Amino acid sequence: MVASSQQDHGFLSPLMRVLATDRRIVISLLLWTAVTSMPALASGYLISRAVDDGFLAHAPWTGAAWLSGLVVTLLIQAGAEQHVVRAQSRLAEALRERLTRDVVVSVIATSTENGWSPPRYEAAAALTSQVESVRRMTGALLSAGLTASVTLAASIVGVACTAPPTLPLVLPAIAAGLLLLRWQSAPLAAVHHNMVVANERISHRTGQVLHAIRDIVAEDATQRAVADVREAIDRHSILATQVARSGIARGLTTAIGGYLPLVLLIGTAPRLLESSLLSPGALVGAAIYTANGCIPALLTLSRTAAGIAAPLSAALRRLAEHRTTHPRTYAPGTALPKTGTLRAVDVTFRHDDDAAPLVSGVNLTVAPGAHLAVVGPSGAGKSTLAFLLAGLLTPTSGHVAWAGVPLTAADQEDITHRVLLLPQEAYVFSGTLRENLRYLRDDVSDDELVHAVRTLSADLLLTGSQGLDRPMSRTTSTAGERQLVALVRGYVSNAHTVIMDEATSNLDAATESAVEAAFRSRPGALIVIAHRLDSATRADEVLFMENGRATHARHDELLSLSPPYAELFRYWERPGRPVTP
């Protein structure tokens, strides 16, 4: 029972943490929202006094004076609303920041659960869509839902103070309407949660189809792929219909809690007036509270519950299901020596049992000091091999070993310090150039950094007067600058073997040559997933990949051993070639 309760409310933990952390903002929001309810609280009373003490008593100026109080309350409300909006925005932004941090950690942790895998489409959707939806819906809930709740409470208090005899007519009906609203909220939230899951399933299945479109067409599986996507869409449509039908129950909430009290007031008005239990002004005041306070508030609450609270609950619950609260930890593995030979033994990799292998039976030895270039047509499995050699993917069969220790049995921390993968899409975070270059080794001196920049012909990074203090971010740097940052970062790291997976694709040929020469002179081994075939001519050995299979030899030998490699190289040397391999 306890576990179930924790599971039911755990999805609200980010919102609860934000509310607990920012108590001053919460208190400010509640106080200023209460101030904005002044018209709802005072309107019925002011009108009742204007009727009884002014117009019915033949004192119109007295009545007008009482009515002028409404203008004062409206002015107070207008002044308070700007404070309410400011507090709502701060709470919504704080929640978005916390959720974004949680989901980013979750996506990264999930993607690395089994070495490495591409982030799930539904996790990406949760980050890009659900977090922003939560921020927007939280702001709307704080705006509409909280204001309507305070207005309803103020109207009830106003009825109790202005026309106490009508309270037994009004209060039970309002309570019944609220109970009906509460009764339908949980099922509606469950339907919205299922809609979120169904929407993710549509994205996931559509993404799978697009990712494997060539295989689907080649295997004549188009109808099956369309059926899989259509099934997800049909499920989402059924759930959307259920949400639409909930509008009937929302109408009952307003009818019972809002219009029924007004009908009862009108129906019992003659008896209440004849018995002198209620003055005409008090009856008008009670009707004002019901018509202008309770009915709009209940209408807003029912709409908020269906259009905001239920989707917000579903989104928070789904984000909680994605969220990983603790960083991934690894079981201790075998320690790896700082230097060693990287060896692939009969390595095969496929995504599942029915898929064609992306890498098939590769055997490879990369000794200290080696310089290997990996080339092949697009889709040959080059990047997959790079991930396997770096320990970011686990072979389906065979194994990759460092100094005789299989990477699957090795200490994960040691692997990251022995084999470094520099991908094509370089990662640069917001900070100074110095901070970015020291990312893999924080004890490197400024002199070493500048020397590394010069050695790799990355002087572009030091242009301007700020030098290593230059601000860096993904949005303010070019793709070439980001690759240079990653290359310098890898050059000064302690990694023994560096794998460059098209890590120079945004650099010119001369800079690429200088980069490879610099890494070649660095202690350790270098593996280049070639963007240009010039890299093959500079390497000690070339590994040519085609359809997941590999052939390796010296460049001049491979021209004779592998006709496809020779053809690829002739194509590369042809003037006016439109693309690079």
Image: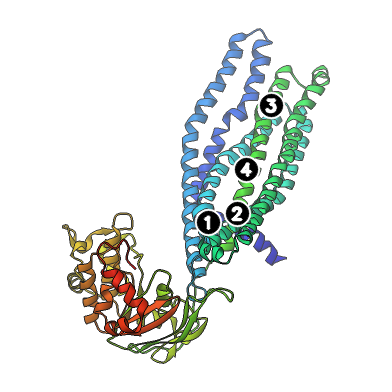
Q: Residues within 10 Å of mark 4 (few under 14, many from 20)?
A: some
**Disc assigned to residue 116:** none
Q: Which residue has dot 4 on it?
A: 307
From what the image shows, is residue 455 above or below residue 481? below
Which residue is depicted at the point 64% across and 52% down? 233
Per the model, the C-alpha gap separating discs 2 and 4 is 17 Å
Per the model, the C-alpha gap separating discs 1 and 4 is 20 Å
Per the model, the C-alpha gap separating discs 1 and 3 is 43 Å
Which residue is depicted at the point 62% across and 22% down? 46
Per the model, the C-alpha gap separating discs 2 and 1 is 9 Å
The type of residue carrying mark 4 is Gly
The type of residue carrying mark 3 is Ala
Q: Are marks 3 and 2 in contact (CB under 8 Å)?
A: no
Q: Position of residue 147 (x, y in %)?
A: 58, 37
User: Between tags 1 and 4, which lies in front?
Assistant: 1
Q: Say which element carries label 2.
A: helix
| Mark toward the start of the polypeptide (3 vs 2) | 2
Q: Say which element carries label 4.
A: helix
Q: Position of residue 291 (x, y in %)?
A: 69, 26
Q: Which residue has dot 2 on it?
A: 199
Q: Are marks 2 and 1 in contact (CB under 8 Å)?
A: yes
From what the image shows, is residue 391 above or below residue 290? below
The type of residue carrying mark 1 is Ala
Q: Which residue has dot 3 on it?
A: 291
